[in-house]
Every structure is written in structure tokens, then in C-alpha cells.
Image: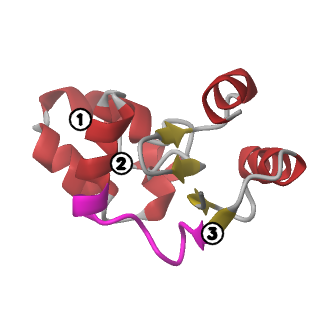
């Protein structure tokens, strides 16, 4: 099975995740998040499939998140508003995202990836 690996080339966590995928012989197609941001429809599907709360999909340590003051704004937004916001800019989205037929992983936690993908 081939996964969709959504990443940002300058992100150190994405680099670690990519190395892990390569080291574990996991097939993937790479998609640069800054060139091809997830769409609202993709995000809706992935949020449901992942079982994670929408907040997990936000890059809370990113500059854009901080500049927009999203820490204070997100609690007052609907789920649809949050998804539409995420779809506007890849720098708002936590990365990497690994998408498979029945799994979506957000962020790279080696222990979680070992448990789910091996």
C-alpha cells in the first residue's frame, strides 16, 4: 500500500518522518503542503478518519497561527469555519500528515507510527 505523505521540506519533524518511512520501507507519495494545501473536503475526510479533534490539525507552533491570534479565536469558531481556515494556507496545518486507506496520522510520533504502521 502506498501512503500520501504531506510535508514541508524545511520542517525538521517532516524530515524525521520521511527518514522513518524510508528506513521502514513504507511506500509513499510526497506532497508539499506549501504547494498543494489540503482542501476543505480532504480535511473533513481526514478529521473523521483520524479520530483526532480538529485542533490537532492546527500547527499551533507556527508563526501564522500566532500572527492570526488563533489561540483565542478557535474556541469561538464552528467546525466548518476551522476547516475552511485550515484550507486557506498550508502553514496553518500541522505536519506531516500521513494518509492511508484506513488511517490518518498527524504529526510525527515515532511510537505511534511504529504501533500503527508496522
Gap in angstroms between the C-alphas marked 3 and 2? 31 Å
In the rendered view, tell whether residue 98 sits above or below residue 90. Answer: above
Lower sequence index among marks 1 and 2: 2
Q: Quadrant of the N terminus?
A: bottom right
| 1 and 2 marks in contact (CB < 8 Å) | yes
Q: Is residue 15 left or right of residue 38?
A: right
In the rendered view, tell whether residue 55 sits above or below residue 65. Answer: above
Q: Residue at x 45, y 50 (%)?
A: 93
What residue sits right under mark 2 in the picture? 68
Q: Which residues are magenta?
A: 30-42
Gap in angstroms between the C-alphas marked 1 and 3? 34 Å
What residue sits right under mark 1 in the picture? 73
Q: Is residue 95 left or right of residue 25?
A: left
What residue sits right under mark 3 in the picture? 29
Q: Marks 3 and 2: which is nearer the front?
A: 3
Q: Position of residue 108 (x, y in %)?
A: 66, 36
Q: Position of residue 113 (x, y in %)?
A: 67, 31
Gap in angstroms between the C-alphas marked 1 and 2? 9 Å
Q: Nearer the viewer, residue 90 or 29?
A: 29
Is 36 colored magenta in this rendering? yes
Q: Nearer the viewer, residue 105 or 86?
A: 105
Amino acid at each position: 500500500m502506498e501512503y500520501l505523505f504531506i510535508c514541508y521540506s524545511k520542517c525538521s519533524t517532516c524530515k524525521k518522518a520521511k527518514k522513518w518511512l524510508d528506513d521502514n520501507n513504507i511506500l509513499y507519495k510526497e506532497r508539499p503542503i506549501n504547494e498543494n494545501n489540503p482542501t476543505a473536503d480532504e480535511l473533513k475526510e481526514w478529521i473523521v478518519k483520524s479520530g483526532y479533534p480538529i485542533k490537532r490539525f492546527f500547527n499551533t507552533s507556527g508563526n501564522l497561527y500566532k500572527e492570526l491570534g488563533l489561540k483565542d479565536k478557535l474556541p469561538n469558531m464552528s467546525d466548518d469555519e476551522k476547516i475552511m481556515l485550515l484550507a486557506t494556507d498550508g502553514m496553518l496545518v500541522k505536519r506531516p500528515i500521513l494518509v492511508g486507506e484506513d488511517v490518518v496520522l498527524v504529526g510525527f510520533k515515532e511510537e505511534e507510527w511504529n504501533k500503527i504502521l508496522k
